[in-house]
Amino acid sequence: MFVLVIGGRAQGKTEYIRNHYSLADEDIGGEIGKQRAIVHLERLIAHQGGERVLAQLSERIGAGDCIVCCDEVGMGIVPTDRKEREFRDETGRVLCALAQRADRVIRVFAGIGQVLK
């Protein structure tokens, strides 16, 4: 099962997945590897680019159960800096593509998960 968890910064996404999916610390990581949960996807997109991250995630998702957490970066004031706007757009496009493939999409706000899909 592929689960996408989104929400604002510091809204309890990691704690939510830790509790609801019975994950230990070693099950959670910030890189696309063998951990069940990948957190801070927005950081990977910023460093590697959306297309590369999507390609790596496609392989990881196909390998078995996977949970991906990402901060919602498209809400709020639009940055004046062009690179920041491009990063927000790219992250949004990646999240749209992942949401289509996900078996479940959950938005976490104040530590409470709301199932969107």
Image: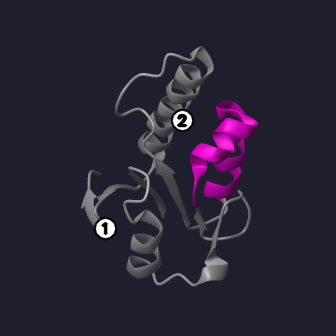
The picture places residue 97, in percent across and down from the top left corner, at 49, 36
Q: Secondary structure at mark 1?
A: loop
Rounded to the nearest angstrom, the CA distance separating label 2 from label 1 is 23 Å
**Stretch of the chain drawn in magenta:** 39-62
Magenta stretch holds residue 18 = no
| Nearer to me, 66 or 95 | 95
Magenta stretch holds residue 61 = yes
Structural crowding at the residue carrying mark 2, measured as other residues with C-alpha within 10 Å and reported as few (<14), some (14–19) or many (≥20): some
Q: Taking 66 as reference, is 82 above or below it?
A: above
Q: Taking 1 as reference, is 26 above or below it?
A: below
Q: Secondary structure at mark 2?
A: helix
For marks 2 and 1, the one nearer the N-term is 2
Foreground disc of the pair 2, 1: 1
Pointer 1: what residue?
Answer: 111
Predominant secondary structure, magenta span: helix
Q: Is residue 54 visible?
A: no
Q: Is residue 18 visible?
A: yes
When asked about the image quadrant of residue 17, the answer is bottom left
Q: Which mark is residue 39?
A: none
Q: Which mark is residue 94?
A: 2
